[in-house]
Amino acid sequence: MLRQFAKDRKGSTTLVFALAIPVFLGGIVMAVEVGHWHQNKSRLQNMADNAAIAAAREIRILADRADAQLTAQGDAFENGFDFSIGKITAHNPPISGNYVGKKGVEIILEQDQPLYLGKYFLDQQITHKIRATALILDGVPACVLALSPDASPGLKISGSAQIDITGCSAHSNSYATGAMEMSGSASFTADCASAIGTILGEEDMNLTACSGAEEHALQMSDPYSDLSVPAGVAAMPCIKPKKKSKSVETLASGRYCKSISTNGTYVLEDGGTFIFDGADLSLQSSASVLTGKNVTLIFMNGGLFNNINGGLINLSAKTSGEYSGVVMYADRDTTPIGSNMTLNGNQTSTIEGVLYFPTIDLKLNGASSSTSDCTHVIAYTVEFTGNTKLTNTNCAGVGTSEIGGADGVALFE
């Protein structure tokens, strides 16, 4: 009977299956656990990447390396990093990897992996150690910046315009397809050209310091975003031009409440600030002249500058004070977005300083001659339709703020 029992194989499969169940279930548990580890590791990598970019941007904007650690920690916390089971360290400059000593930030993020059923199978804690490196990019300073985030195009070169901004670049902050566009028989010479969105007509651009136009670039900061009109404008008395001769009128520094225009010459008081409050300033003919040294013209409550017939403009900005480097400015708070302005300065015009129209669609049909030391254009959108030469040769002397330069950060590791 014992021999018969030993030969009996009935139920052996059930026994083997029963013995295999714990191993099978353990494999499933570990597969799920390992999948969770990989998911968590990917999430931590995203945190490290974002923290590196945030810290590098902080350094670029404030030029303060001490803030890198706090900025990285703050960014990681906002993205859900648990400091009770991990830590984050910022190295500026990077101390490992392919970019040791470069201008940027290296983030080392360490965090223990929470274990669930895996703790019954492992005899030690799993710790993730993640690296990310973001570098500060040295860009070419810009002469032209279009601020609109969605215009298509934000920056346009059209018709037969001959545009020369050698020594600086042009940039559009628009995310749109065709954020920058070149068309017709126009020519465009610049060190570089870039846009957050895409660029049309790149193949016809003559870029002397870049291998090609840069699409999907980082946003370029507006260096005059904090500029505002003088305090107490509403309480200022309204004044008018004064006749100096039959064809010449002088404008004193102050507030102008009614639109003024001339077929002759307007001479601005040296060192003055001229506020056109709901009033336009117009040059009526190609023989008209607007001239002034160390001046700032401010347009608010819908006031605009009109020069559609190509009068002569000879202006230089102040070189110090709140409006240093700003030759014309339209107040963003009182000028509707999308207001239109056409500036037809002729080729002997000289404009030194920045034309700053943050809410205006600006069309330029000739704006400055080669004798200007520094001419910048910042507007909501910019269109070049005529010959224009902008320069960046002595902007420090003119008092303008640099547009771009160290124009962003990028993740490299």
Image (cartoon, rainbow, N blue to C red):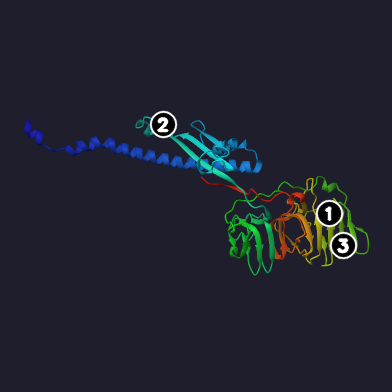
Contact, mark 1 vs mark 2 (Cβ under 8 Å): no
Residue 31, horizontal then vertical, whole percent: 35, 40
How many other residues sit within 10 Å of disc 1, few (<14), some (14-19) or many (≥20)? some
Q: Is residue 118 left or right of residue 162?
A: left
Residue 194: x and y, percent? Answer: 61, 56
* In this rendering, position of residue 363 left or right of residue 239: left
- Left or right position of 134 against 364: left
User: What kind of residue is marked 2?
Assistant: Gln
**Residue marked by disc 1:** 293
Q: Which residue is mark 2?
A: 125
Q: Residue at x 74, y 64 (%)?
A: 366
Amino acid on which disc 3 is placed: Thr
Q: Amino acid at mark 1?
A: Lys
Location of residue 89 (image quadrant): top right
**3 or 2: tag closer to the N-terminus:** 2
Residue 157 in view, yes or no = no
Image height check: is 45 above or below 87? below
The image's mark for residue 265 is 3
At which x and y percent is residue 66? Answer: 62, 35
Picture quarter with the N terminus: top left
Q: Earlier in the sequence, mark 1 or mark 2?
A: 2
Helix, strand or loop for disc 1: loop
Res. 389 in view: yes
Image x and y of residue 364, in percent: 72, 62
